[in-house]
Amino acid sequence: MRYWLQLIAWLACVVYSTIPAFWFMIHPFAERWRARHLSYQRSPYMVLLPVWMVMWAVVALVTRPWRGILLYRADWPWGAAALLFVGGFYVYSQSGKNFSAKQLGGLPEVHGRNREQRLVTDGIRSRVRHPVYLAHLCEMLAWSAGTGLAACWALTAFAMVTGAVMIRMEDAELEQRFGDSYRAYRKSVPAVLPRVFGQRQL
């Protein structure tokens, strides 16, 4: 049982750790992807998704030699992990409210005209600008805390560093798209660590 939990944890962290890199392929080049979509009438995801899967394979191969190394071995951290899992799933569920599947999937970023272009600042996004990243972080921390795997902790640290860079890029792209309204939103709402008390006032 422990072996399978560790295997699932490692594979989950492999995928999660590449999410910022996946978005790095999108946000700095959003205009190019839109132009490509308009020119060829083919979804950029036909290129992006296979490249992302290659990233999974590369990260898995790089970290495989260390996936069995434990920083600690205990059962009690699974209590904290359970809370993080629940918190992550809750944030995921709230992230989907007032936010379309197209927006969650990043279609407005890579598709051209006739795609949904609206800034959502209510619900959970009145407390945190990037709740999906927060949910990803909760899940990675849960797997890392529960298993104690060095590879999971390393991948979580890697995701936090690359995620911070990606959030800056995403904010810049959103500011270009939505202008002053996003600048005001960015100034008043934290990026990943949510405001617990009080509501955003714009």
Image (cartoon, rainbow, N blue to C red):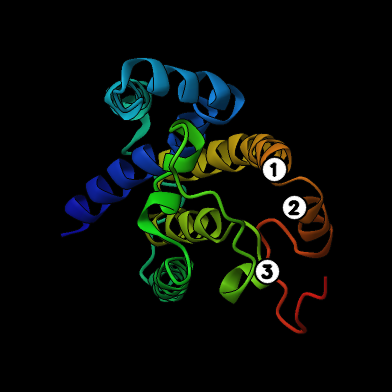
Mark 2 and mark 3: Cα distance apart in space: 17 Å
Q: Nearer the viewer, mark 3 or mark 1?
A: 1
Residue 7, visible in the rendered structure: yes
22 or 137, which lies in front? 22
**Residue type, label 3:** Pro
Residue shown at 55% from the left, 36% from the top: 158
159 or 25, which lies in front? 25
| Residue wearing tag 2 | 182
189 or 153, which lies in front? 189
Q: Position of residue 31 (x, y in %)?
A: 56, 23
Asked whether disc 2 touches disc 1, contact meaning CB atoms under 8 Å apart, the reply is yes
Residue shown at 37% from the left, 26% from the top: 59
Disc 3, SS: loop
Disc 1, SS: helix
The residue carrying pointer 3 sits among few (fewer than 14), some (14 to 19) or many (20 or more) residues within 10 Å by Cα, namely some
The residue carrying pointer 1 sits among few (fewer than 14), some (14 to 19) or many (20 or more) residues within 10 Å by Cα, namely some
Q: Position of residue 179 (x, y in %)?
A: 77, 45
**Residue type, label 1:** Asp
Give the number of the disc on residue 194: 3
Q: Position of residue 88 (x, y in %)?
A: 45, 67
Q: Position of residue 24 (x, y in %)?
A: 54, 28
Q: Nearer the viewer, mark 2 or mark 1?
A: 2
91 or 96, which lies in front? 96
**Residue type, label 2:** Tyr
Mark 2 and mark 1: Cα distance apart in space: 8 Å
Nearest to N terminus: mark 2 or mark 3? 2
